[in-house]
Amino acid sequence: MILQIAIDTPLRQVFDYLPPSTGTQERPPLGVRVLVPFGRQRLIGILVGIVAESAVPALKLKSALEFLDESPVYDPVTFELLRWAAEYYHHPIGEVYAAALPVSLRAGQPAVLSIEHWSVTEAGSEELVRPSSRRAPQQRALLSWLAERSSATAAEVSESFKPAQLKSLQARGWIVPRLSQLAGDSGAVEVQPGSLALTGAQAQAVETILTTLSSFSVHLLYGVTGSGKTEVYLQIIAAALAEGGQALVLVPEIALTPQLVDRFRRRFSGGVAVVHSSLTMRERRDAWQAAHSGRARIIIGTRSAVFTSIPALKLIVVDEEHDASYKQHEGFRYSARDLSVMRARGAGVPVILGSATPSLETLENAASGRYVKHILPQRPGAAQPPRMSLVDLRRHAAEQGLSTPAMQAIDQHLKAGGQVIVFLNRRGYAPSLFCNSCGWVAPCAHCDARMTLHRRALKLRCHHCGAQAPVPTICLSCGQALLPVGQGTERVEETLTRLFPDAPLARLDRDTASARGAIQTVLERVHSGDARILVGTQMLTKGHHFPEVTLVVILDADQGLFASDFRATERLAQTITQVAGRAGREARPGEVMIQTQFPEHPLLQRLIAEGYESFAASALEERREAGWPPYSRLALLRAEAKDTAGLDSFLRAAAASGQSLNESAAKESTVKILGPAAALIARRADHFRAHLLIETAARSSLQRFLARWLPQVEALSGPKGLRWSIDVDPLEVD
């Protein structure tokens, strides 16, 4: 019996071991953790296979040291999903399996949650029948209390006694702790009824999806902003729980989590677990154990929650499915949305993809019949879509990025009692520090990029590599005065505070949201009405519900109109539609003003006049003609090194290797290898960056090519410090 162990290393292989020399020799289940010797280290891996023979000579095989679990730490569907993901994304299998576990479990802590119960020993019982002593009356009282209850946990003891007394009684031999596993609980969860009646479209979506609750299907819930997608989720989840199942709900950002969790906990009496990267190690372990044991009936989380072990999974919901946050951009580059579909397929359960601005790939899948589309065309109740207009910055003067019409509208809405959102997808005070005399611009010393001025922190910061520098008082080239050029959210906040001193303001971006609890504090200020103006970046587009917001002003809407990435216009249309949807979500009408230098641009005109669906139809036709996804499949080989010549040589050798494979497989020669090409920011953190783009018409031909090509790439020599990675289905190709 040879154990195949996946170890958390960058090596693309499993490692063969003999079973531990001590302990049972029965066949262990796949998916348990195993402690193994690895070089001079002792590492924890995952048992992923058992075979009869090994390619490693018998004398060189080492024995595993210990099995850490009696049962697998993954449910069967997730275990197979991780194996599939390692193959599809061509990532080291050990790192993939490790990514699905909390850090504490990777370090060897128990996977099964145990609880300590204290009970009275025979010596303790004898002590109780002896005549009472005046010494330590509280200890004797605790001893008597425990004897009456047979056993109790430390938490129960602490309600009436000092926990330190337990140790004193244990030292006397009068009580003893015993560990017992915390049992799972799949009992019913009490569900509170919704407060709003469903619209006809909502009711139709709920009814149709419920008929597929016991089989695999993919449902696109395409609803305009504020149309009540969450209520549809809640009703279908309630039905899944009533059948004894568990539900997984994915959200794109931590910023969404508190608001959504609060709504779920108001609807369901208990059993809601939260999984995201801002939790402490213990919180993540507890959430994982609650899901794995079945005590948590609803698991709400960000991207990595797709790997949570959920043995009774009955439904998956991916909210804001279009969001780029579902794609991991470093290390194991997976798409949580796509893996959710694969996980639902493996479990034989439905998955709901919800969005007001679905990705073009999802819309194409719906058009082809692979996904079922449900449309929520209107907001419930009296809420109406906001009125949208373009502000031509060529005709209207702007003060620190704010046009005269925008400032007048802000003033009117504030006087009418409404709240205002000002959106700018650029944090900091100003994107450049500029010398008007010689043209010097503060550069990053480590990147081909400019430093952003953060005035409040008195720092220049690079938003690409994280480098910081003090703010110079004069030009480092000619000694003249320096000017901040352009606007970031910090500068817009300063301007609005000066223009509207009586309107309390809050700012929401990565700078203000870095502290634990900061996001929730800002959101509470907005919901309570304490903040009348909210300035922010992309975080404002993530599905927030602000009932009193009546005006949204979008600054610098032109950032994505002329970008080099073919997805840029799609992302811009989604951003504008999403942030515009924060206005007028209740009875009060909403207004959206979009500032632009190009009001005649077809994208903006189509969005204003016909909405996102019309834009998407046009964009899909352009993609079809150009042969871009979803009508082709891409992979990106990214590489970086400090030696630019060596980097170029490595990528040229990799491209030549791929071309040779194409020539040797004439029937599969539809794979194109484009490049090498420098990245948009060619130097970042003192490393030069470039890539090869792999393009083909079919997913199967791409996978066959990568499986044959990547081992050859691994064998190539490169410059010192070379790092490379493969990104299958990349969201960014510049």
Image: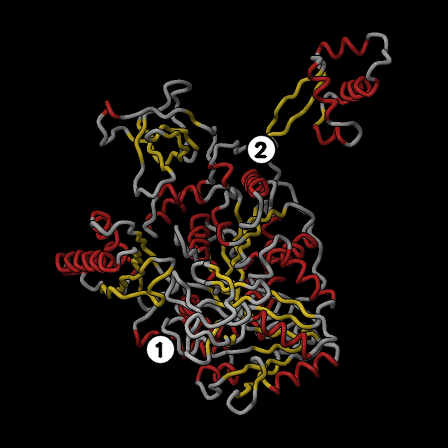
Q: Is residue 300 above or below residue 285?
A: below
Q: Amino acid at mark 2?
A: Leu
Measured as percent of width and height from the top left, residue 674 is found at 24, 66
Q: Is residue 585 above or below residue 516?
A: below
Q: Is residue 70 above or below residue 275?
A: above
Q: Secondary structure at mark 1?
A: helix
Mark 2 surroundings within 10 Å by alpha-carbon count, few (fewer than 14), some (14 through 19), many (20 or more): some
Q: Residue at x 55, y 61 (%)?
A: 510
Q: Nearer the viewer, residue 345 or 461?
A: 461
Q: Residue at x 44, y 50 (%)?
A: 343
Q: Secondary structure at mark 2?
A: loop
Quadrant for residue 440, please give it: bottom left
Quadrant where the C terminus lies? bottom left
Give the residue number, with chain letter if any, for mark 1.
622
Q: Residue at x 61, y 33 (%)?
A: 183
Res 363 seen here: no
Q: Amino acid at mark 1?
A: Glu
Side of 554 relative to 449 (left or right): right
As drawn, the label of residue 113 is: 2
Q: Nearer the viewer, residue 272 or 99?
A: 99
Q: Nearer the viewer, residue 264 or 499?
A: 499
Measured as percent of width and height from the top left, residue 203 is found at 61, 66
Disc 2, disc 1: CB below 8 Å? no
Q: Residue at x 35, y 60 (%)?
A: 729
As drawn, the label of residue 465 is: none
Number of numbered markers: 2
Measured as percent of width and height from the top left, residue 96 is found at 39, 45
